[in-house]
Image (tube, grey):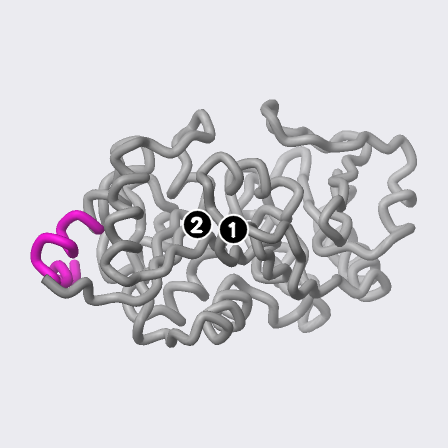
Amino acid sequence: MTFPFKLVATDLDGTLLRGDETVSERTREALAAATSAGAAHIVVTGRSVPWTRHILDDLGYDGLAVCGQGAQIYHAGEHKLLTSLTLDRQLAGLALSKVEAEVGPLALAASRDGLEGEVLVGPGYKVHEGRLPYVFVEDASEMWAAPLNKVYLQHPQLDDDDLATAARAAVGNLVDVVMAGPGVVEILPLGLSKATGLSLAARRLGVKAADTIAFGDMPNDIPMFGWARHGVAMANAHETLKAVAHEITASNEDDGIAVVLEELLRTGSLATPH
């Protein structure tokens, strides 16, 4: 049976990873079977390289990965950053002032550029407990001292969707705003998305959008679904992503990626769109 795709693109958090940041044996085996059938697997994540590298190493992943919402193309096997796009700090500062004029003071964090780029966390910003390293800075101005890939926003009252909507309306065409996960609203360079990074990586791999199946769970995966031939949302996905998905699978905890890949490997054809 011929596997119908040459590229399998997977988000990490809420998609490939379970809640404990591991990948199940079933999903590992399904991805290995897909690659044995001739497809490449590519990770496409909002995480910057320093927050992604340990996961890729644990998977034994040695191909390309798209990190930082598309800003970085990383060669996992060579531990090498191939491309990296930075955020114009002057534009970002102007955008933030416009958002704060609308919604009041924000808590901020920022991801520095580079293979060893630290995530700097300012006063009041609530971080997710876990393995991901960060550096607390008492003076938020320290965040702007070196090139950045992105800035994270939090608001004391607004939820993620409301903050993203308000920020998007306030910044105009200065920067882009995405909601990438629970408590994760980000300011990015204008025009940057997972789709732009994935298209660059796919070109390096010699494959096209028509050859690609993509898996995701959050609004920042919408551009990737628009680019790929087939977009699969996890059962735990945000409703805005489910609305544009070609297919909805089981959750990340229930091996949703494996469910789809196993069926494709068995039948060689796609499920009927929902």
Residue at image point 55% right, 48% down: 162
Residue type at mark 2 is Asp
Disc on res. 45: 1
Q: Secondary structure at mark 2?
A: loop
CB under 8 Å between callouts 2 and 1? yes
* Whether residue 172 can be seen here: yes
- Relative to 122, 67 lies left or right: left
The relative height of residue 197 versus residue 23 in the rendered view (above or below) is below
- Label 2 packing within 10 angstroms: few (<14), some (14-19), many (20+): many
Was residue 262 drawn as part of the magenta stretch in this picture?
Answer: yes
Q: Position of residue 47 (x, y in %)?
A: 59, 46
Residue at image point 91% right, 43% down: 142
**How many numbered badges does the structure rendering display?**
2
Residue at image point 78% right, 39% down: 120
The relative height of residue 80 versus residue 134 in the rendered view (above or below) is below
Q: Which residues are magenta?
A: 261-274
Q: Secondary structure at mark 1?
A: loop
Residue at image point 63% right, 48% down: 49
Q: Position of residue 38 (x, y in %)?
A: 27, 62
Viewport quadrant of the N terminus: bottom left
* Whether residue 165 can be seen here: no
Pointer 2 residue:
11
Residue type at mark 1 is Thr
- Label 1 packing within 10 angstroms: few (<14), some (14-19), many (20+): many
- Relative to 8, 141 lies left or right: right
Viewer-nearest residue: 225 or 153: 225
Viewer-nearest residue: 107 or 151: 151
